[in-house]
Image: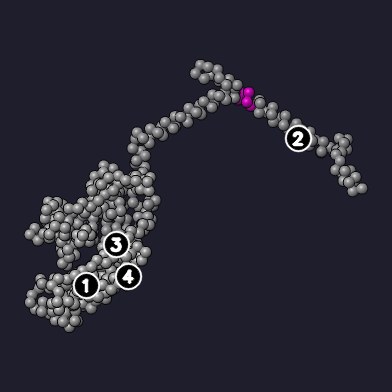
Amino acid sequence: MLDDSLERSFAPRSHSNLSDLEKNCSQIFVKAPAITREFFEKINNDVVPQKTAFFGYQMNTRRVIVLTGLMLLFTFSAMGTVTMWFTNMFQKRIESMMVLSEDAPTYEMWKKPPIHPPIKIYIFNYTNVEDFEMGRAKKLHVEELGPYVYFEEMERVNVRFSKVDGTVSYQEKRSYRFSPELSKGSKDDLVIVPNVPLLAGAAIVQQFNFIMRLGYQGIINALSESAFTAQTAHNFIIGYDDRLYELAKSYLKYEDKPVFENFGILVWKKGIRPDVFTLNTGAHDINKLGQVEKFNGQTHYEMWGSESCNNLQGSDGMIYRQDLVRARKDLDVFIPQMCRKLPMRFAGEERLLDKVPVYRYKVPLDVFDTAENADNQCYCGQNSDSCPPKGLFNATSCLRASVLLAPPSLWG
């Protein structure tokens, strides 16, 4: 019964039973496809002819349209190829993107580099200090400890751009994180090392009169200071409190020398450095991108023996001159801790991760051969007779303290 009722309910009605409205609508929908097809055929015949003359030949219009499209595609592709490979337009576009600015795609990477380079520090531990001081040993014995590896994180802060000069000024903020996995030894290793504040102070007072030297000796005796001090490896590297250094802070401020919270190997690099770098942004000349224009507002030094050595030249170590890199020529890197530039010589082309081609540069072995290397003689200072031995760099004029620098290979 239910099936019969459903069949009757959904059975189509005859044409005679339809209303006038339903009859009209059914006629419209039946005729619509035919009308549409006739309309487009008429448009196709009247507007788009079946045949078109193409270079003197009668060809199918659709084929002509396809051939025309292919020719246009080939023409634009050829124009793009010529523009890219036979003009400098593409190179100019790349260079415009390299200009250092707040809107540049590389700005955030430049401001806070994502790469944290490891710093390997070796400490020479003096093992027979007591015997040497008591006269039981004629020479001091040292053992090499380390490396103690720290990852350096650097950020450029207080960034200020000058569109007129095409420069950017900034300060550096650095922090250090110890890596026990890469280090050979614990950061809590006890080491016996020279008392650098005491020795530096002794070198400074040698320039003063007898009364000043006598007063310094009295301070040393009152503090019971020794020429050597015992520190943990981490404190010696990152910083430790020293009573003599605390007393010397007033003198350092008076002499307009940098003053740090405590003393350590890396303490002068930790935190926000007071030094202000001014780099070329490349806005006026892309080949000057990343070149040091000023350091602490100065365009040159006055401590070395020639104009070439006193000039502030070179890169900050992150961006190098594009014209020199393309020509595989030597590069210069400005090292503020040495008040000089170091040459980087092209050493060859290599593959990074077996795919990416890169250039390798190395510091020449004779960079610290001050006396023998004519290019380095000006770094002896105003008096060439004060040149240190081969392999050493006298940084006294730069750091205003008796400091000799040497490459890591000197001990070996």
Counting from the top left corner in percent of width and height, residue 68 is at: 51, 26
- How many residues crowd mark 4 within 10 Å: few (<14), some (14–19), many (20+)? some
User: Is residue 278 highlighted in magenta?
Assistant: no
- How many residues crowd mark 1 within 10 Å: few (<14), some (14–19), many (20+)? some
Q: Nearer the viewer, residue 165 or 247?
A: 247
- Disc 4 marks a residue whose amino acid type is Lys
For mark 3, give the secondary structure. Answer: strand
Q: Nearer the viewer, residue 46 or 369?
A: 369
Foreground mark, 1 or 4, reads: 1
For mark 2, give the secondary structure. Answer: helix
Q: Main secondary structure of the magenta part?
A: helix
The residue that mark 3 highlights is 120
The residue that mark 4 highlights is 187
Q: Earlier in the sequence, mark 3 or mark 1?
A: 3
The residue that mark 1 highlights is 127
Q: Residue furthest bottom?
A: 222
Give, as a single range, the part of the protein colored magenta.
Answer: 43-47
The residue that mark 2 highlights is 29
- How many residues crowd mark 2 within 10 Å: few (<14), some (14–19), many (20+)? few
